[in-house]
Amino acid sequence: MASENPVPFREALQYRDIKELMPTSMGSAELARLEAAVRERAMFSARTMNEQYLQAIAERVRALLGDEGLNQATARLELKQILREIGYEAEPGEEGTIKDLSSDARINLVLETNVEMAQGYGQWIQGQDPELLDFYPAQELFRAEARKEERPWKSVIWPEAARAVGDTGALSALRFGRMVARKDSPIWEHISDFGQPYPPFKFNSGMDVMDVDREEAVRLGVITADAVVQPQSRGFELEAA
Amino acid sequence: MAATFTVDVRDASKAILATAEARMSPRVVNKIIGRAGQTFVRKHFYDLDAKRPNRMGGDRTHFYGGAARSTTFAATADGAVISVNQTGVRQRILGGPILPTKSKYLTIPARAEAYGKRAREFNNLKVVRFGNVLALVEADATKLRKTKKGFRAAGETGGGVMYWLVPKVAQKADPSVMPNLESLRVFVLEELRKAVAVAKGGAQ
């Protein structure tokens, strides 16, 4: 095992770095109605107007992505201290809830969602390399982490999405008990509450995706043997080295 | 510091590699090695995440899940490098001393609700000495219950140890945190074999 030349997760770091701060009074429902392309290029949190605090979140997300010796507990503590310094107080009746910017639940959600989106995008864009797509044209949605309350992905969300977008390959794989679709299927954006084709697809979902090779994808009926899967772009990718 | 694994299959199976490089460029071969290696390492860490919950119970931090998500790869001239960019992974593999950086003591959780939290996130802890041992203990307080007329006392709380304070910890090495490199190589070679079939002109 060598650690002299660790490889930074460039794509995840770039995803974080292209974001502009977007102080906003909008709540989560209004923010969800923004186009995905806008949200992907913005650093925001529902009803968070203070630019200094948003900048502090952005810096901690980057540090967590970059393996800079910061862990989530320390990041959370630092953000709470900053909120105290700027004189933040939760609205009466909202203390300790998800609407309280200083609550554990809120800060954890902000940090985890931002870090996981950057990583999810990073894994996704690496898999869009045309030379890799030929061999890994599909991916599988699976439960990566248990949750106390798990959404009905396999019984409801996935099959409804497959039917909605007309992905017969995804429905074919489901007969084998697998949630597999070609990487360029619209199903990925369809299952996402954020309109993005990469995980996390919902807040705190515990789901992730993993490559499925061509041989397996053909066997499951997701693609035909000669299918060509097109590389996707979000419009802000690194140019290939 | 990231935990990095170098995947070099050159010695393992010259035959598969020669066939692969006859059908595909070395660049593509090494990309497949990297991506397959990344997949293997991610699966390894998600497996650990499922099998190793917090021993005290309480809210999980999903440390190994984070390791899986932070895993990236880069193709090299001879193979690929897989890098796990999660603080703490390398420490767990190699073990060694852990020393406080910003204070005199490390805080070791004594109960479930302390796990995954920094001591300074609690505003009701006080330092107490038990013989030679220091601890952060909940301050005594009165529990209150809300009533229609205001609040009334509903018992006493406090006194429990939340964290033990220690000057350093010697963490044991845990090589099982690292993926089995031989299994990784076998997996990658199998993926290369299948890639050769695709490059020939169709999945078998």
Image: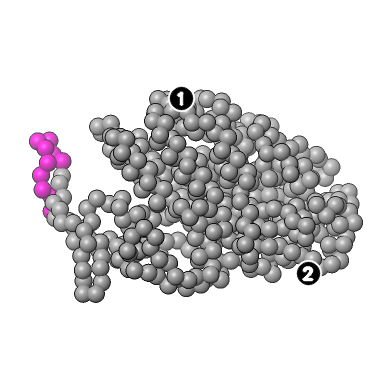
Please tell me which residue lies in front, B70 or B56: B70
- For residue B12, which numbered disc appears in the image? 2
Q: Residue at x 56, y 38 (%)?
A: A17
* Label 2 secondary element: loop
Q: Position of residue A239 (x, y in %)?
A: 71, 38
User: For this view, does A114 lie left or right of residue B187?
Assistant: left
Residue A152 falls inside the magenta stretch? no
Q: Residues within 10 Å of mark 1 (few under 14, many from 20)?
A: few
The answer for which chain carries disc 2 is B
Which secondary structure is most common in the magenta stretch? strand
* Label 1 secondary element: helix
Q: Position of residue B76 (x, y in %)?
A: 74, 56
Residue at the disc numbered 1: A30
The residue range painted magenta reads B146-155
Please tell me which residue lies in front, B20 or A159: B20
The answer for which chain carries disc 1 is A
